[in-house]
Image (tube, rainbow, N blue to C red):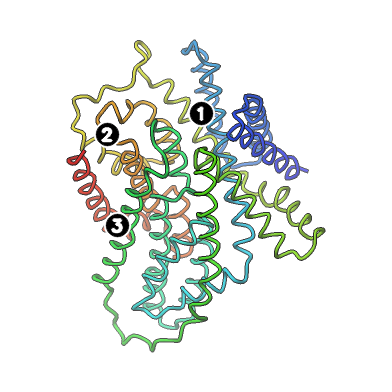
Amino acid sequence: MLDKILGALLVFIGVAVIVREWLGSEIGALAAACGLVAFLAVATPFTSWSRKAFVAIGLVLAGLTVALRDDWPAVFGEAAAQGAFIATFFIALASLRTPASASPAIERCGQYLASQPPGKRYMALTIGGHLFALILNYGSITLLGGLTEAIAGKEKNEEIREIRNRRMLLAVQRGLCASLCWSPLAFATAITTSVVAGSSWGGTAPYAILFALVFLVTGWALDTLFKPTLSAPPPARQTPIGSMRDLAPLLTLLVLLFAGVGILEYLTGLRIIAVVMLFVPVISIGWIASESGSAAETLRRLKRLSLVELPSYRSELVLLVMAGIIGTLGAALIQPLTVGHALDLSGVPVWLVLVAPVWIIPLLGQLGMNPILSVSMLAPLLPAPDALGLSPNLFVAAVTAGWALAGATSPFTATTLLVGRLGHVSALKVGLVWNRAFTLWVGAAVSLILVGFAGLS
């Protein structure tokens, strides 16, 4: 019964948010806010203490907002809109993850990538992790990471097995983090473009894709240049499982997704996140229908998706939604209460404003601050990038690069936790030991590129 209630509430929130985004309906906004409050009230008692703590913090901030802000109803509306948007975006991506993770064709694609010979394996897995992340998000680590662990586990030499597992897991993780720089299906892009005035995904993409390439190439270069020395001769190479043809389903799906999203964005003029929230579930429903074979089976699977699988993410949803709400309320309270203006950065060099997010967001991640929270809280405090002589799209790219580095280093993010579990080490070791050199090199390279762009602006 709990799952059915939560599932129904999530579907209700999703429909209300889509109505608000596509039709500009205030009724949709109000319905989404009411549904979100109901979801949090029902779900929170059944989550861990850390999630309950986030809700408690949100309630405290809500009380302070009422006490200190005369416009608290508007602030509450903004916070509820942010939380409902995060919930809808999450369930849209989760709806695609369900048929993809269960698809035999997608699994064959993953096996082909994970079974490549040592000289090609890192690049195959980091590109594969990047592409899989576009449709599976963190599920790409679960799928590819599980396959790499199984393949590495067949190696009898313990030293080789541990080294191989570590290198393969890092390739997948870094590929996923690179996707956070630019993917319209990632929270990093969706949330940052929604809080930075004047930005758009289309304008951000050229810069962000460049930074994603920095992630991919730097990871491959470090893996190639600093290979561990083995105490025994390496084992004989084995033939990869499958062939290049196994990549076709993944590539076809990606072309369909991005072409559809791009065309709809151009035709409708809506924000990319509004298009994603509707188009991705439509693709998911079509995929489920094509594999079901009958209307009755399609309805059964959709019912299971809505009332069983989506509610299973309640813990993650409470955390992400509250991160967005806390960030919005915190920003409203932190703003100078006497004058109500954004921070004065007129005396700060432009290049420093650009470079700061690349390092501040990962640093806050070490303190347990989710990037959703830190970006939602800090971005509204800043003046509009145009007022500083900055391109809003370039600033968004800097923020998403910092977000991606936080994903690689923070011991509190899903990527490091998953990689640590599959690699049989702590998330802290994954973030600060395994990815230390990678983070420093990528951060330095992205910073230099941003300084160059700042000089041209």
Name the residue tied to disc 3. Answer: 214
Residue extending farthest to the right is 296
Name the residue tied to disc 1. Answer: 57
In depth, the one of 258 and 86 nearer the eye is: 258
- Identify the residue at horizontal 56%, vertical 74% (top origin): 108
In the image, is 221 to the left or to the right of 311? left
**Disc on the earlier residue, 3 or 2:** 3
Specify few, some or many for label 2: CA neighbours under 10 Å numbering under 14, 14-19, or 20 or more.
some
Are discs 1 and 2 less than 8 Å apart at CB? no
**Which quadrant: the C terminus?**
top left
In three-dimensional space, the C-alpha distance between marks 1 and 3, rounded to whole angstroms, equals 37 Å
Name the residue tied to disc 2. Answer: 390
Specify few, some or many for label 3: CA neighbours under 10 Å numbering under 14, 14-19, or 20 or more.
some
Where 298 sits versus 337, above or below? below
Specify few, some or many for label 1: CA neighbours under 10 Å numbering under 14, 14-19, or 20 or more.
some
Q: Nearer the viewer, mark 1 or mark 2?
A: 2
Q: Position of residue 24 (x, y in %)?
A: 59, 29
Q: Position of residue 202 (x, y in %)?
A: 41, 45
Question: Disc 2 marks which amino acid?
Answer: Leu
Q: Secondary structure at mark 1?
A: helix
In three-dimensional space, the C-alpha distance between marks 1 and 2, rounded to whole angstroms, equals 34 Å
Residue 185, label in figure: none
Q: Position of residue 201 (x, y in %)?
A: 42, 43
In three-dimensional space, the C-alpha distance between marks 3 and 2, rounded to whole angstroms, equals 22 Å
Residue extending farthest to the front is 267
Question: Disc 1 marks which amino acid?
Answer: Ile
Q: Nearer the viewer, mark 1 or mark 3?
A: 3
Rendering quarter of residue 373: top left
Q: Position of residue 8 (x, y in %)?
A: 73, 40
